[in-house]
Amino acid sequence: MNQTLTGAPPLLRAALKQDARNIGPWIVLITALSASSVLAYGWVFPGVPERRELQATLGANPALSLIFGPARDLMTADGFNAWRAGALGTFFAALMAIFIVVRNSRADEDSGQAELLASGVLGRQTRLAVAMIMAALASVVLGVFSWLVTTAFGGGALNSLALSATFTASGLMFTGVAGIAAQLGSDARAANSIAVATLGIAFVVRGYLDASEATAWTVWLTPLGWLEEVRPASGNNGWPLLLALGLAIVLAAAALVLHGRRDFGLGMIAPRRGPARAGLVASVWGLALRVNRGSLISWLVAFAGLGAVFGFLATSVGDVFAANPAMGGLIAAGATTEAGLLFGFLVTILQLVGIIAAVFGVQIVMRIYAEEVDCRVEPVLAGAISRAKYLASNALIAFAAPAVALLIAGTVIGLIAASAEPGVSAGDVIRQAVATIPAVWTIVALALAAVGARPAVRLVGWLGVVLTFVLTLLGPLFKLWDWILGISPLWHVPNVTATAVDWSGLGGVGAVAVLFTVVGFAGFRRRDVI
């Protein structure tokens, strides 16, 4: 064996054993996304009339194309599965691969575990190679498991195989992306940010091209577009998978080359030097701002970019609404004009932006516990800082940052949409963004309650984001009862342009957010700090 990979087999076995519990849930959840689509299709759309209505309303819906991609065939269970699980499945498979690679390469350097391993018989490239092999194996297992389970639940063998292969291909490509990001970032957090940002850009570009019905060749501008061209259940083309495999090999090789030229414990992008004086860090409020400064800047810039993308997208969907009036009932119930349909589309877009903003806020809340695990909280609390004040300094940022992000995105969307569509008011779009903020705060407050009171169940915060996404964007599609849809805080956000706006639901959502916040503070005051 090449000396640069000395020690790979035993390290791979040990790492797989240790990380299996982190990898398993990703495989199960992505598989469930596919299998549940096949299983639910016959129940929700039992006859041809229901399926024709589904095809007519969703087939050309730009808001859903942005997230799920083009709906090529909604008349069959396999075609519905390819639409509902295709784009999301490839996205989550890529996330899984990114986290596996960074967690088992740069994160080990940050914790000191890599230095301990390097003191044994281990080649220079072994750790990164093992991390990428783990991600590749997880991607392959995901593809095989998803194919078997989806087929068992009634999916066509060939159609399900094509769809599951796109999951594997996405994981393999972003294994290489994560490998490169691990060499560029100054630490594991920076590496994750670079890789996830790359994935996010690829997903948004893919969504924009699909929703705006861009020229066919533009689909090749993003690797996720390549996977769309596999066309599961409506073509089953295998050759785009070969392109994805080739790209994965090239990226993995590049990552290994960069790893050989990088200093241990450092990234190729050097971190900024700290300030010569304490400045804002002299107070606990400034410390919280300083800890989150990098992510705040990155996220707020990203929201400005999302606002521009969604704003330009809104200006291009007028013709789609004019040609497909049937979708009006889905996007904007009660809208009778093109302007009303367009604003309904913007409401859906702002709901999506709100979910992304909730991810931003929950990430900041989770940083509270990450700082605690890294033993940085106890020294702060050892001084004249109360627990309530420390938590409040971080909670303030966790609530304020998503609100500012929503306002930035809403303002950009409104200005761009209003400049091209006279029937849309920028002020209305901004007001709709403001109305969405309390719903986002409720999701963030749920995460705060978990981290503050019982960190062992902190994943509840992320489950809140996922559940909100599912109920808000997929709940109406499956004709769920209102009381189930009402679990999503975004369901209670009214359309501010309605004739009679009902704010009572939003008031209830705000009260729940306050309750969760109180639980978080009360729990943090009583529990042990690591």
Image (tube, rainbow, N blue to C red):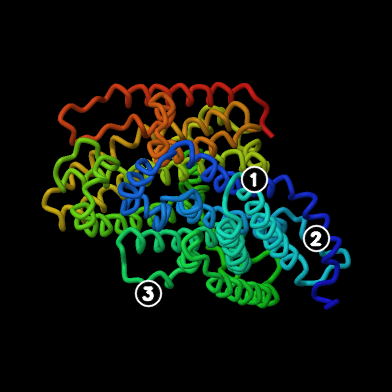
For badge 1, the amino acid type reads: Val
Q: Which mark is residue 217?
A: 3
Name the spot of residue 75 as percent of width and height, x first.
Answer: 41, 50
Which quadrant would residue 190 be assigned to in this image? bottom right
Quadrant hosting residue 477: top left
On the question of residue 405 being in view, the answer is no
Q: In the current view of this chain or complex, which residue is farthest to the left?
A: 422
Q: Secondary structure at mark 2?
A: helix
Tag 1 residue: 28
Residue type marked 3: Trp
Do labels 1 and 3 touch, CB within 8 Å? no
From this viewpoint, which residue is outermost toward the front?
48
Residue 24 versus residue 308 in the image, above or below:
above
- Judged left or right of residue 179, residue 89 is left
Q: Earlier in the sequence, mark 1 or mark 3?
A: 1
In the depicted structure, whether residue 81 falls above or below residue 358: below
Q: Around disc 2, counting alpha carbons within 10 Å, would you say few (fewer than 14), some (14 to 19), or many (20 or more)?
A: some
Q: Residue at x 80, y 60 (%)?
A: 12
Q: Is residue 212 visible?
A: yes
Q: CA distance from mark 2 to mark 3?
A: 41 Å
Residue 115's spot in the image, x, y percent?
A: 78, 61
Spatial CA distance of label 1 from label 2 is 22 Å
Label 1 or label 2, whichever lies nearer to me, is 1
Q: Is residue 69 left or right of residue 130?
A: left
> Which secondary structure, mark 1?
helix
Spatial separation of the CA atoms under disc 1 and disc 3: 34 Å
Would you name the residue on which mark 2 appears?
12
